[in-house]
Image (tube, rainbow, N blue to C red):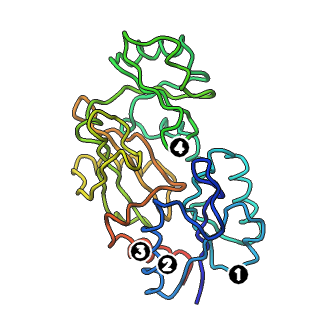
């Protein structure tokens, strides 16, 4: 049976991952995808993304999945993927896509579909004050330009912050955005495409009194059809993103003006929520089979 490498990381949130082990959040989705793959005549082999011998394992290709430690060594991540491809192993999404998607500055390319963002080399008091003025926002959110899992993410109120509040802000290049009130009510929407085909949509609602919509254990996830306007905004952004993606997740939040805003395009290692939309595993497995000729 043909095999496809299922790339994962050596650690998750600082804890080492044993060989063939996946983070707890990934296990149910992997099981569903593995079953779908077997129905199509191929199987997955779990492998660390930085193992140098991957091209020699005889796999039809590799997909980037739970590589949730890549942001801790992003340059090495891209270099490893490029080395695999030079040695003859096709990796998807491709290293060039990974490089494009790794730094959130790609939002600049998405036009009006993207949330308004101020870019700063450092999230210091001066940059924050200027961002409040430029965005004309009552509250802002500061995030790292390269990051994951809401790390180094800070929310500030216009007249209720001090330099001490920036201790948890990004230490390097930052992005500053208006806080959108709907994140606490509507939540965040995630829309998925596999092989260019729209697959499913998920709504992520933070716990009462919280505002982060992607923290396992503190967020309610549910399958929920995408509002037509959200789908249209996501499609507008997808049209400006790299084409021929094996998989992509687009996250949106409803703006205070009633328009949907793309807050992230995730084309590296998105969580796919198959445990909330099991039928989507078959869509993804089919796309993998087509792309790798299985």
* Residue displayed at 23% across by 46% down: 229
Residue 76 shown left or right of residue 184 in the figure: right
* Residue displayed at 22% across by 51% down: 228
* Vertical relation: 180 (above or below) 291: above
Q: CA distance from mark 1 to mark 2?
A: 18 Å
Q: CA distance from mark 2 to mark 4?
A: 30 Å
Q: Residues within 10 Å of mark 2 (few under 14, many from 20)?
A: few
Which SS class for mark 3? Answer: helix
Q: Which residue is mark 4?
A: 148
Q: Mark 1 vs mark 3: which is more N-terminal?
A: 3
Quarter containing the C terminus: bottom right
Q: CA distance from mark 4 to mark 3?
A: 24 Å
* Residue displayed at 58% across by 62% down: 64
Q: Mark 4 vs mark 1: give the one in front.
A: 4
* Vertical relation: 176 (above or below) 96: above
Which SS class for mark 2? Answer: helix
Q: CA distance from mark 3 to mark 2?
A: 18 Å
Q: Mark 2 vs mark 4: which is more N-terminal?
A: 4
* Vertical relation: 47 (above or below) 125: below
Q: Position of residue 134 (x, y in %)?
A: 42, 16
Quarter containing the N terminus: bottom right
Q: Mark 3 vs mark 2: give the one in front.
A: 3
Q: Position of residue 20 (x, y in %)?
A: 62, 71
Q: Mark 1 vs mark 3: give the one in front.
A: 3
Residue 192 shown left or right of residue 175 in the figure: left
Q: Which residue is mark 3?
A: 32
How many numbered marks are there? 4
Q: Residues within 10 Å of mark 3 (few under 14, many from 20)?
A: some
Callout 1 touching callout 2 (CB < 8 Å): no
């Amino acid at each position: 049976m043909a095999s496809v490498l299922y790339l994962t990381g050596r650690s998750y949130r600082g804890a080492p991952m044993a060989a063939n082990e996946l983070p707890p959040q990934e296990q149910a989705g992997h099981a569903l995808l593995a079953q779908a793959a077997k129905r199509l005549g191929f199987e997955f082999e779990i492998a660390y993304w930085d193992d140098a011998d991957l091209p020699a394992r005889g796999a039809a290709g590799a997909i980037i999945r739970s590589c949730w430690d890549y942001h801790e060594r992003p340059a090495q991540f891209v270099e490893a993927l490029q080395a695999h491809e030079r040695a003859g192993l096709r990796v998807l999404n491709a290293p060039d896509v990974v490089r494009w998607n790794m730094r959130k500055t790609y939002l600049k390319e998405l036009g009006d579909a993207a949330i308004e963002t101020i870019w700063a080399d450092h999230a210091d008091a001066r940059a924050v004050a200027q961002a409040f003025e430029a965005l004309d926002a009552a509250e802002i959110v500061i995030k790292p330009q390269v990051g994951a899992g809401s790390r180094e993410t800070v929310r500030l109120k216009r007249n209720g912050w001090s330099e001490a509040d920036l201790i948890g802000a990004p230490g390097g290049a930052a992005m500053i955005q208006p806080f959108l009130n709907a994140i606490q009510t509507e939540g965040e929407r995630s829309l998925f495409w596999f092989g260019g085909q729209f697959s499913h949509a998920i709504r992520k609602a933070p716990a009462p009194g919280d505002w982060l919509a992607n923290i396992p254990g503190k967020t309610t996830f549910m399958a929920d059809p995408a509002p037509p306007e959200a789908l249209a905004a996501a499609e507008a952004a997808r049209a400006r993103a790299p084409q021929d993606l094996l998989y992509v997740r687009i996250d949106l939040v409803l703006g205070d003006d009633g328009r949907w805003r793309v807050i992230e395009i995730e084309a590296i290692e998105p969580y796919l929520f198959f445990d909330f939309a099991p039928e989507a595993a078959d869509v993804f497995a089919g796309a993998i089979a087509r792309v790798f000729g299985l």
